[in-house]
Image (spheres, grey):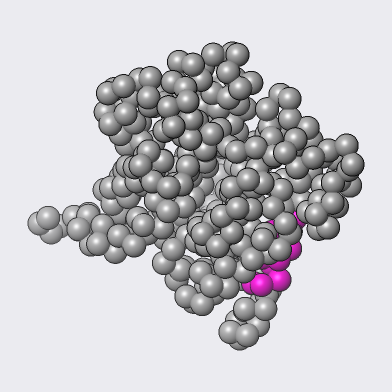
């Protein structure tokens, strides 16, 4: 029997940056599909605006830096960053906020630091944090209502509102917007207006608590969880950061809140499946450039993010905390990697 002979080297070629970016984007598809189902056309418009503006800013920055535009433009990093920005910001924000987000991510956080591989912070999260601090009203109240009774906009109405701030005569802004379940529940619990058991009641505010984590929001997190598990299965990412982040968030919420008073603090499952928990654990915290790189360091990095998320959600001024937690832990990466270097083969630890 003849066998195929292949000359050396018999080594598997390293995965390319483009392949990694494509794999992550493919893994985002379930979450994108669920968000489109819930939010409608305004969400898709945000994605197109973010992608278009991000690619334009990337091309201009590369040209000014005298770098090969085509090679870096097609590596998929700017495309992925733009999608993450669109996933993070409210669906009904004006178009110029989306463009500003792309500018802060691509130009200020990525290209000014030297491009892909040199950025210290996660570009999408820096963009989100700057937008939230600079435009708190638009970034807080322009989330589309995704409850069962919420009105939705068709494609034409979404374009008119996003670009011209115009709504049909029979639709008011209050009818199509609402605070996120995480924001609403935090406000209700902190003010003493209701307890967790009352929030779970089907009769309270259109069942705002949902099944485990807020009206329909749990479906978004389940979709991102499915995509994240697929990335671990295909070895695009390792388990260290997602598992340590979610586990530390679960432990903190159990020991510091729910375990003390279950009527004043949401359950650990609520924290795991609300806000951007799954998106942050699998798609944001695992950024190969700004995250820790050593095996032990990844566990410390993820655990730190989980603890900070719970602390900011519970005692901070913002309902969700993925961006701030990731940015703060990005600062600590050099120290974490320095003290968690694995033992070199043949040398003492």
Above-or-below relation of 326 to 66: above
How many numbered marks appear? 0
Depth order, front residue of 37/259: 259
> Of all residues shown, which one is farthest toward the left?
348
Highlighted range, magenta? 47-58
Judged left or right of residue 317, residue 24 is right
Residue drawn at x 58%, y 37% is: 180
Residue drawn at x 79%, y 43% is: 41
Above-or-below relation of 7 to 60: above
Depth order, front residue of 266/75: 266
x, y (%) of residue 53?
71, 66
x, y (%) of residue 136?
56, 55
**Magenta-span inclusion, residue 52:** yes
**For residue 33, which quarter of the picture?**
top right
Depth order, front residue of 90/205: 205
Depth order, front residue of 55/98: 98
**For residue 73, which quarter of the picture?**
bottom right
**Res. 276 in view:** yes
x, y (%) of residue 294?
30, 54
Residue drawn at x 68%, y 32% is: 146
Quarter containing the N terminus: top right
> Of all residues shown, which one is farthest toward the top?
202
Judged left or right of residue 206, residue 182 is left
């Amino acid at each position: 029997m003849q066998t195929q002979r292949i000359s050396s080297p018999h080594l598997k070629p390293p995965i390319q940056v483009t392949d990694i970016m494509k794999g992550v984007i493919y893994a985002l598809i379930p979450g994108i599909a669920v968000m489109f189902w819930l939010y409608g056309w305004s969400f898709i418009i945000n994605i197109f605006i973010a992608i278009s503006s991000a690619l334009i800013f990337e091309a201009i920055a590369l040209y000014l830096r005298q770098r090969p535009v085509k090679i870096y433009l097609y590596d998929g990093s700017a495309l992925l960053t733009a999608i993450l920005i669109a996933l993070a910001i409210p669906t009904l924000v004006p178009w110029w906020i989306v463009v500003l987000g792309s500018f802060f991510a691509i130009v200020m956080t990525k290209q000014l630091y030297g491009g892909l591989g040199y950025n210290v912070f996660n570009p999408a999260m820096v963009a989100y944090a700057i937008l939230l601090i600079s435009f708190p009203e638009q970034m807080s109240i322009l989330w589309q209502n995704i409850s069962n009774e919420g009105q939705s906009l068709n494609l034409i109405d979404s374009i008119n509102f996003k670009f011209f701030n115009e709504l049909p005569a029979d639709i008011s802004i209050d009818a199509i917007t609402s605070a996120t379940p995480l924001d609403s529940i935090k406000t209700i619990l902190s003010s003493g207006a209701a307890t967790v058991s009352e929030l779970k009641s089907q009769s309270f505010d259109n069942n705002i608590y949902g099944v485990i984590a807020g009206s329909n929001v749990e479906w978004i997190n389940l979709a991102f969880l499915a995509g994240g598990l697929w990335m671990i299965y295909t070895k695009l990412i390792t388990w260290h950061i997602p598992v340590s982040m979610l586990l530390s968030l679960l432990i903190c919420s159990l020991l510091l809140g729910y375990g003390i008073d279950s009527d004043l603090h949401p359950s650990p499952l609520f924290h795991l499946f609300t806000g951007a928990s799954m998106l942050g654990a699998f798609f944001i915290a695992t950024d190969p450039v700004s995250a820790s790189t050593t095996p032990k360091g990844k566990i410390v990095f993820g655990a730190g993010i989980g603890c900070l998320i719970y602390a900011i959600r519970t005692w901070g001024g913002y309902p969700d905390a993925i961006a701030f937690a990731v940015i703060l832990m990005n600062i600590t990466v050099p120290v974490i990697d320095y003290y968690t270097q694995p033992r070199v083969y043949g040398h003492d630890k």
